[in-house]
Image (cartoon, rainbow, N blue to C red):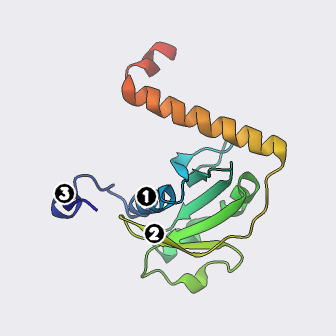
Amino acid sequence: MSPFDHQTNKTLPPLPGQRLARGVARALRGLDFVTLEEMIPTSGLRVDLMALGPKGEVWVIECKSGPADFRADQKWKGYLEFCDRFFWAVDADFPTDMLPAETGLILADAYDAEIIRMGPQTPLAAARRKAMLQRFARQAALRLQNHRDPGVAALIG
């Protein structure tokens, strides 16, 4: 945890859900997972955080800033077919009894996170896993390319 983060908050994302995603991503990195925020597993769906494990595991983490945010989420069950495990990430003040017991639970803040309950493992079919790994790799590479050369998108489109 950098003193810079606490003193100025310049490196913290502005929205509560983004702050949770940051803490979860940091914690998962410690477990040798890499993550992408706002990953699109298929047209019409966007998960808050997708994590790729060292053995090719695919986890989806939905970050909820409060009960209203959770109640408004109508798409989460559609994410289950795109991951091996599904988790909710919430802060310590969230009433976790509202979350479905058959899903994973992560308590997080902007700096760290802890897995409280593992989501059940429902392994992806081989073809779906391959498609998800390719989509993950392409989205990560595109983000890196756009970061390194922000003008490249204008050349394509």
Task: Report if the CB atoms under discs 1 and 2 are less than 8 Å apart.
Answer: yes
Tell me the amino acid under the disc marked 3: Phe
| Residue in the picture at 59% in, 65% down | 73
Q: Secondary structure at mark 1?
A: helix
Residue topped by disc 1: 26
| First in sequence: mark 1 vs mark 2 | 1
Where residue 37 appears, x then y in whole percent? 50, 49
Residue topped by disc 3: 4
- The answer to which quarter of the image holds residue 116 is bottom right
> Label 1, label 3: how many angstroms apart (C-alpha)?
17 Å
| Residue in the picture at 60% in, 35% down | 137
- The answer to which quarter of the image holds residue 87 is bottom right
Task: Report if the CB atoms under discs 1 and 3 are less than 8 Å apart.
Answer: no
| Residue in the picture at 62% in, 50% down | 54
| First in sequence: mark 2 vs mark 3 | 3
Q: Is residue 118 left or right of residue 142?
A: right
Where residue 113 appears, x then y in whole percent? 45, 69
In the rendered image, the residue lying farthest to the top is 155
Q: Secondary structure at mark 3?
A: helix
Judge whether 94 appears above or below 150 on screen: below
Residue topped by disc 2: 113
137 and 40: which one is in front? 137
